[in-house]
């Protein structure tokens, strides 16, 4: 689009120049009138002529009323002789101001420059312009094999990142402090014969801060940071990816000490020779070149390669052997304390009301990554601006938490009176069963406001972070998931499609208990089924069954048994607390949402 506009402007300028030149030479002709010699003689006889200018064979006439005319005569015939021959007396000739103007310069301009030089200049200009275009395209072709790496200099203070800008992941930062210390003081390690790892693989779920941590390592070490994605190596032409890998390491070695960061390593580092689609020549050649480059430099020259991936299980084993990416740094999801620190970092530059408690926000966001928390505060700021408020309050933050988790409110999704009643009893059933079972997390909020695809929702938040869960906790959570289904069946003697997602989650969790966690009394402590990934067809598309049909029947029987037991438990709880179920459902129909304190108060009545 830019090239088209540029060409259009050039042609417009050329057109205007040519139009100006031609208008210059045609202006006199447009303003004057051509007459014959007889008319000129008649005007002189009548003493109407004030001035005559002679330009070779052209006679330019100005009359007494300032009218401009012109006529032509023979080239070598003098004007005075011509007038005398026509009978004009010398006295009348003397009354006319006669001038002679040389036209040699103009004739040269008209006869030589305009017909020859001007087209030549235009042609030369067009050739130069198009040669520049071709040269640019040719240079792009020559640069096709260059890496598209982005370089961040340590002098760039605006985007420089250090460990102070990375909250949580303390163990990961401790592992990487050795890399920072080596880049700052390499002699301390070399004197002891130590070799710093050439490659460090950062492993963690999406949004946990892998890229941020890599930039922080470069910022702490005060060295150049080369950032490239694994997908930027791959092209449709075989060999381009390998060329870009070579170019990347050449550029990095010219700026030692330095850090090279390859984001999404699994895009190019997948295991070779896997999948139904066979090998992929370009990707495998690129991976081979990465392996060669990692082997091809001394570990103590001051170059460290960092890479990030959330799928380490599919990486080629050759990448992970000692001498290449021989150190693996695990980044976990932040706990409550880490979430509070992350929120403080992302709260910089945002005006908050005095009532805002980031610790409370951290408690209400279990499972959120650093990117989720950043998005949360950004959504809160957007909502505050939308409401024309000057400071971000807790209400905006809580609203943003639910927006991030469940989606925006669907105000246009209007339920009928009967449907609202069903949703109210459904969510009240979830909340009551969860509240009365010790294995469930405390109920934080119950609402019948539609969000995302849910007609209503019950939020449960843990008071403490948990890494392990036991069988009784799973059973209580399954019973809580079935609480809405049980409530509908008990109150309305029928069930609706609103419980579909609850049933899906309960079934999935129950099957995991039986087949993965060894929590079945009949089947015992073993796993069943082995997931296999077919790379070119998607994730977990196939399962290799390592059990018989008889065991398959037992698995189905155990899943059904556990779900039915939990469903009966939920029914018993709701029957014993039917009065509270009615009270909470009516409160939801009236207020639409119940926060933790109000819900607990109703449960105590």
Image (cartoon, helix red, strand yellow):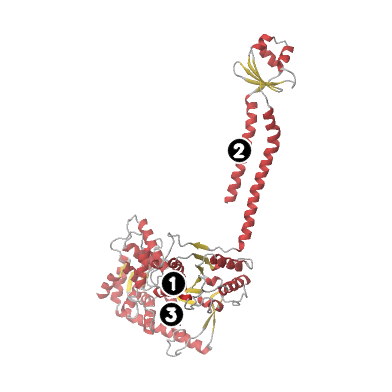
Viewer-side residue, 341 vs 573: 341
Q: Which numbered disc flags the more N-terminal residue, 2 or 1?
A: 2
User: Can you tell which quarter of the image residue 331 is in?
Assistant: bottom left
Q: Which residue in the protein does label 3 denote?
A: 509
For the residues marked 3 and 1, what is the alpha-carbon distance in whole angstroms?
46 Å
Residue contact between numbered discs 3 and 2, judged by CB atoms under 8 Å: no
Q: Residue 220's x, y, as percent?
A: 43, 67
For the residues marked 3 and 2, what is the alpha-carbon distance in whole angstroms?
76 Å
Q: Is residue 369 above or below residue 577?
A: above
Which numbered marker is on residue 16?
2
Q: Which residue in the protein does label 1 denote?
A: 181
Residue 449 seen from this side = no
Q: Quadrant of the C terminus?
A: bottom left
Counting every numbered tag in the picture gives: 3
Q: Is residue 86 above or below residue 121?
A: above
**How dense is the environment of label 1, judged by Cα within 10 Å: few (below 14), some, or many (20 and up)?**
some
Viewer-side residue, 370 vs 287: 287
Closer to viewer: mark 3 or mark 1: 1
Q: Residue 451's x, y, as percent?
A: 40, 66
Q: Which numbered disc flags the more N-terminal residue, 3 or 1?
A: 1
- Circle 3: element type: helix
Identity of the residue drawn at 70% across and 34% down: 112
Identity of the residue drawn at 67% across and 38% down: 118
- Circle 2: element type: helix
Q: Which numbered disc flags the more N-terminal residue, 3 or 2?
A: 2
Residue 570 seen from this side = yes
- Give the side of residue 393 with respect to residue 454, left or right: left
Viewer-side residue, 416 vs 261: 261
Residue contact between numbered discs 2 and 1, judged by CB atoms under 8 Å: no
Q: Residue 421's x, y, as percent?
A: 35, 69
Q: Residue 322's x, y, as percent?
A: 53, 79
- Circle 1: element type: helix
């Amino acid at each position: 689009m830019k090239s088209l506009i540029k060409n259009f402007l050039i042609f417009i300028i050329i057109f205007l120049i040519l139009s100006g030149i031609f208008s210059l030479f045609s202006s006199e002709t447009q303003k004057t009138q051509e007459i014959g010699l007889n008319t000129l003689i008649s005007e002189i006889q009548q003493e109407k002529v004030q001035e005559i200018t002679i330009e070779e064979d052209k006679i330019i006439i100005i009359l007494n009323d300032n009218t401009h005319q012109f006529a032509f005569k023979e080239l070598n015939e003098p004007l005075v002789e011509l007038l005398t021959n026509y009978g004009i007396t010398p006295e009348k000739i003397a009354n006319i101001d006669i001038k002679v103007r040389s036209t040699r310069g103009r004739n040269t301009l008209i006869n030589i420059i305009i017909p020859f030089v001007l087209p030549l200049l235009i042609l030369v200009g067009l050739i130069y312009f198009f040669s520049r275009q071709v040269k640019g395209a040719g240079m792009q072709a020559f640069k096709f094999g260059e890496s598209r790496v982005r370089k961040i200099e340590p002098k760039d203070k605006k985007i420089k990142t250090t460990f102070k800008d990375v909250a949580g992941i303390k163990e990961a930062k401790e592992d990487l402090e050795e890399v920072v210390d080596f880049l700052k003081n390499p002699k301390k390690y070399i004197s002891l014969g130590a070799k710093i790892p050439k490659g460090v693989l950062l492993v963690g779920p999406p949004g946990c801060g892998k890229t941020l941590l890599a930039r922080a390592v470069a910022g702490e070490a005060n060295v150049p940071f080369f950032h490239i994605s694994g997908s930027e190596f791959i092209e449709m032409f075989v060999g381009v990816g390998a060329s870009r890998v070579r170019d990347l390491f050449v550029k990095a070695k010219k700026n030692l000490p330095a850090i090279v960061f390859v984001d999404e390593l699994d895009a190019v580092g997948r295991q070779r020779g896997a999948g139904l689609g066979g090998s992929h020549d370009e990707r495998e050649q690129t991976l081979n070149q990465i392996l060669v480059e990692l082997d091809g430099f001394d570990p103590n020259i001051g170059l460290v390669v960092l890479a990030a991936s959330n799928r380490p299980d599919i990486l080629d084993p050759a990448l992970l052997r000692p001498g290449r990416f021989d150190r693996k740094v695990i980044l976990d999801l932040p706990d409550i304390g880490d979430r509070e620190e992350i929120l403080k970092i992302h709260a910089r530059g945002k005006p908050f009301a005095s009532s805002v408690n980031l610790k409370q926000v951290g408690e209400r966001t279990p499972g959120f990554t650093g990117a989720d928390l950043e998005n949360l505060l950004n959504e809160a700021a957007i909502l505050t601006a939308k409401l024309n408020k000057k400071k971000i309050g807790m209400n905006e933050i809580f609203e943003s938490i639910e927006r991030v988790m469940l989606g925006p409110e669907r105000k246009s999704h209007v339920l009928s009176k009967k449907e609202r009643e069903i949703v109210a009893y459904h969510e009240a059933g979830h909340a009551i069963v969860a509240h009365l079972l010790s294995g469930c997390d405390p109920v934080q909020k119950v609402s019948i406001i539609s969000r995302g695809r849910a007609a209503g929702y019950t939020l449960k938040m843990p008071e403490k972070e948990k890494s392990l869960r036991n069988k009784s906790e799973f059973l209580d959570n399954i019973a809580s998931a079935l609480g809405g289904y049980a409530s509908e069946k008990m109150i309305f003697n029928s069930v609706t499609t609103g419980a579909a997602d609850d049933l899906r989650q309960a079934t999935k969790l129950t099957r995991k208990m039986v087949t993965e966690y060894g929590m079945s009394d009949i089947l015992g402590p073993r796993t069943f089924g082995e997931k296999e990934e077919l790379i070119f067809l998607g994730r977990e598309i196939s399962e290799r069954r390592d059990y018989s049909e008889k065991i398959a029947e037992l698995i189905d029987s155990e899943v059904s048994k556990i779900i039915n037991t939990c469903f009966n438990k939920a029914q018993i709880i709701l029957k014993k607390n039917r009065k509270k179920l009615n009270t909470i459902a009516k409160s939801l129909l009236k207020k639409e949402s119940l926060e933790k304190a109000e819900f607990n108060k109703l449960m105590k009545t």
